[in-house]
Image (cartoon, helix red, strand yellow):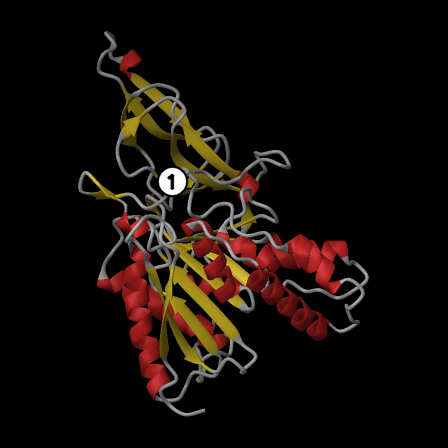
């Protein structure tokens, strides 16, 4: 393979209105025939800035590796995965989380192609996992190619899946409001994917076979364990390590953090065989993974102003006061304070960025070890 494998593609989305069509930029490195593929995107929630900066630093690292002929797999980057959302400015604020046309979260209701893939692979599965992986990926590609959505957001979701469905690694970079770095992934991927959380320095890894409403990472990974359940007589491994990486909070945007996260992604890809060279030993895992069903959504019960007594990253015990809600309209001092306590032992992973409470609003998340939600619940927030 010759040095300088980098290519840049631009894909046009269907116009949503007259004279208004957007494009999606895709950067590719390496050799498509290498047999190893990683796909990384950021900005699906267009109002989450840390991933854009990480992508800037990661492109620099991969450009250097490419120039030195060190990329041994195929690496695909989508630096701005939501050209629809990045145009959603209102009152000097970038929105970018929900489709303005129908209100659907851009990271929900992605393409579930399991059923048509089942029809294509019936009677063709083998006794060797490698053959089944190739068969399933081919079927996935055929199903995707046969679909021709015309609505802009659906077309975008279809396009992103067309780039990522055959990847061994799929990373979707996001951020929370005020938060520590944490990772979401499918339960069948753990503990084999623990090196990702360890390398990134994730303080929590949240696992679910089904998290609800089909986010992007599950569109790439869940099909593998769904097919394994439908065809138990044949070896079908979880062949796509897809994860949502929450790069701390909205304001955690600095070259120091961006370069650190990019370097960790680079080392992870190197250790996984996509970049030549020997990566250092995997750092110790900060905390073992816990079930997404164990995440407590700490909600407001009264309106007021928030005072947090705990910060993201701190451990909490059941009954600990996480925050106080202050309502200055109450006459007596004690009645002005409503203390909100944790219902579980765990780690405070995120809080809201502003300091206002509205009854029912989620103010914080605690990653606990005990399940708090029943089977079938939607485990994701808005």
Task: Point out residue 30 in the picture as x, y percentages from the top left corner.
Answer: 44, 81
- State the image coordinates of residue 75 (x, y, percent, origin top left): 44, 74
301 vs 262: above or below: above
> Which residue appears at 56% of the width and 44% of the height?
211
Question: Quadrant where the C terminus lies?
Answer: top left
Question: Vertical placement of 153 versus 282: above or below?
Answer: above
Q: Which residue is mark 1?
A: 101
Visible residue check, residue 244: yes
Residue 20 percent across, percent down from the top left: 29, 53
The reply to whether residue 193 is in sight is no
User: What count of labels does the image hold?
Assistant: 1
Q: Is residue 167 left or right of residue 362?
A: right
Residue 132: quadrant of the picture: bottom right
Residue at (35, 70) in percent of width and height:
263
Residue sitting at the far front: 18
- Horizontal arrangement in the rendering, residue 188 relative to residue 20 (left or right): right
Residue at x 45% of width, y 84% of height: 276
Which corner quadrant holds the N terminus? bottom left
Circle 1 Cα neighbour tier, 10 Å, few/some/many (<14 / 14–19 / ≥20)? few
Q: Quadrant of residue 55?
A: bottom left
303 relative position to 271: left or right: left
Q: Position of residue 126 (x, y in %)?
A: 78, 71
**SS for dot 1:** loop
Q: Is residue 46 above or below residue 282?
A: above
Asked where in the image residue 325 lies, by quadrant, the reply is top left
Picture residue at 27% right of the left edge, 50% below the top = 87
**Farthest residue, direction top:** 331
């Amino acid at each position: 393979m010759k040095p300088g494998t980098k290519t840049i593609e631009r894909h046009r989305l269907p116009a949503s209105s007259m004279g208004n069509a957007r494009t999606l930029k895709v950067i590719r490195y390496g050799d498509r025939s290498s047999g190893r593929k990683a796909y990384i995107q950021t900005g699906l929630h267009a109002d989450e800035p840390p991933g854009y900066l990480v992508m800037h630093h990661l492109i620099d690292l991969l450009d250097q590796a490419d120039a030195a002929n060190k990329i041994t797999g195929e690496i695909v980057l989508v630096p701005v995965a939501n050209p629809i959302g990045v145009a959603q400015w209102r009152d000097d604020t970038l929105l970018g989380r929900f489709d303005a046309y129908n209100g659907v979260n851009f990271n929900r209701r992605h393409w579930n192609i399991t059923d048509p893939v089942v029809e294509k692979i019936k009677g063709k599965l083998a006794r060797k996992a490698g053959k089944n992986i190739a068969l399933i990926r081919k079927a996935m590609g055929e199903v995707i190619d046969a679909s021709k959505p015309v609505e802009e957001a659906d077309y975008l979701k279809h396009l992103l899946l067309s780039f990522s469905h055959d990847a061994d690694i799929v990373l979707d970079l996001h951020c929370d409001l005020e938060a520590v770095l944490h990772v979401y992934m499918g339960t069948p991927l753990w503990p084999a994917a623990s090196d990702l959380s360890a390398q990134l320095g994730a303080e929590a890894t949240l696992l679910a076979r089904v998290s609800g409403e089909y986010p992007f990472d599950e569109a790439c990974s869940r099909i593998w364990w769904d097919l394994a359940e439908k065809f138990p007589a044949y070896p079908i491994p979880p062949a796509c390590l897809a994860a949502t990486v929450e790069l701390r909070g909205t304001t955690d945007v600095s070259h120091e953090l961006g370069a650190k996260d990019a370097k960790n992604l680079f080392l992870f890809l190197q250790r996984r065989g996509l970049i030549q060279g020997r990566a250092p030993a995997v750092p110790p895992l900060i905390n073992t993974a816990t079930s997404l069903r164990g995440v407590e959504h700490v909600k407001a019960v009264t309106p007021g102003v928030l005072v947090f007594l705990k910060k993201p990253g701190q451990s909490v015990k059941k009954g600990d006061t996480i925050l106080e809600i202050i309502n200055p309209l109450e006459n007596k001092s004690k009645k002005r304070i409503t203390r909100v306590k944790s219902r579980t032992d765990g780690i405070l992973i995120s809080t809201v960025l502003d300091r206002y409470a509205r009854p029912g609003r989620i103010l914080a998340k605690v990653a606990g070890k005990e399940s708090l939600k029943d089977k079938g619940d939607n485990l994701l927030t808005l």
